Amino acid sequence: MKKIIHTLILVLIFTGIWLVLNESLAVSQLLIGLFFSAVSILFTNRYLLEDDYLDAYAIKPEVLLHYSLYLFIQIYQSGFAAILKIIKGEDSVKIITYETCMSNELGICLLANALTLTPGTVTIDKNGHQLQILAFQDENAFTDITEGKTCSPYEMILRRMDH
Amino acid sequence: MIDLLAYLLITIALIFMALGVIGLFRFKDFYSRILISAKIETVGFLTIMIGFTILSGLSYAAMKILLITLMVMITNPLSTHAIARSAFLSGYPINQEPRR
């Protein structure tokens, strides 16, 4: 029952995107949208994913919202910090080997994505739970594996996906 | 008033982008250039798209702009990641000025 409800929510989201792209709220467009949304989810589940769509992309809406808001703030904060670096000409970089606190693959990918979106850090490699992060020399939000273990604020948010 | 806010955001975005381009020329190391180019992609792009959304008002165009922004925010890091990763795996050294 829970699975059906989650699938229906996805169908409604995809139908919304269809209506926006077609710029119409006509009943015919709504029906076509519902049809193609359902077909695309079934096709993805059947042929494109090893796991079920809902298992592979299971994320709580409140976690996603919190993650998005935090990411938005961080993007601008780091953006302003990067301006200072440009003015001062501080171009010294380092590569950090960082071990994540998360076990969820989607969570690790979201973390890697957030790091690359934030000016001043780029994820350059992922090996299991270890990420290699390219960062400016004064970056201290992500500690190197040799300096001891601390969870970054991103992980504290994304870890809530596991529960 | 709303239009003024939109134009202000677009102007801020253009300033961000201009500073990013200055950074690209100012920094000599490949990896620091990659880090700065990510700034243009994210901060500049996000701000200019918010400006365009406000300028479009509550319309299908605004919703399309938001959809495009969402898609770009998901896919954009992949290109930066791919370029940095290929340089790292091919053994490109960090903190080294390129030969002229």
Image (cartoon, rainbow, N blue to C red):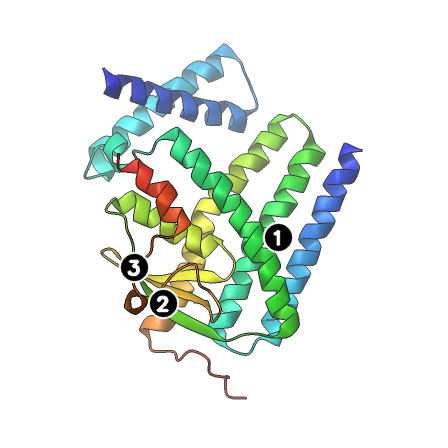
Residue type at mark 1 is Gly
Question: Which labelled disc corresponds to residue B8?
Answer: none
Above or below for A46 versus A132: above
Mark 3 = which residue? A149
Mark 2 = which residue? A96
Residue A142's spot in the image, x, y percent? 39, 60
Q: Residues within 10 Å of mark 3 (few under 14, many from 20)?
A: some
Residue A153's spot in the image, x, y percent? 41, 48
Q: Chain of mark 3?
A: A
Q: Quick check: marks 2 and 3 in contact, CB under 8 Å?
A: no
Residues beneath discs 1 and 2 located on the same chain: no
In this rendering, position of residue B79 left or right of residue A159? right
In this rendering, position of residue A103 left or right of residue A123? left
- Quadrant of residue A126 within the rendered picture: bottom left
Residue B4's spot in the image, x, y percent? 79, 39
Residue type at mark 3 is Lys
Above or below for A126 versus A138: above
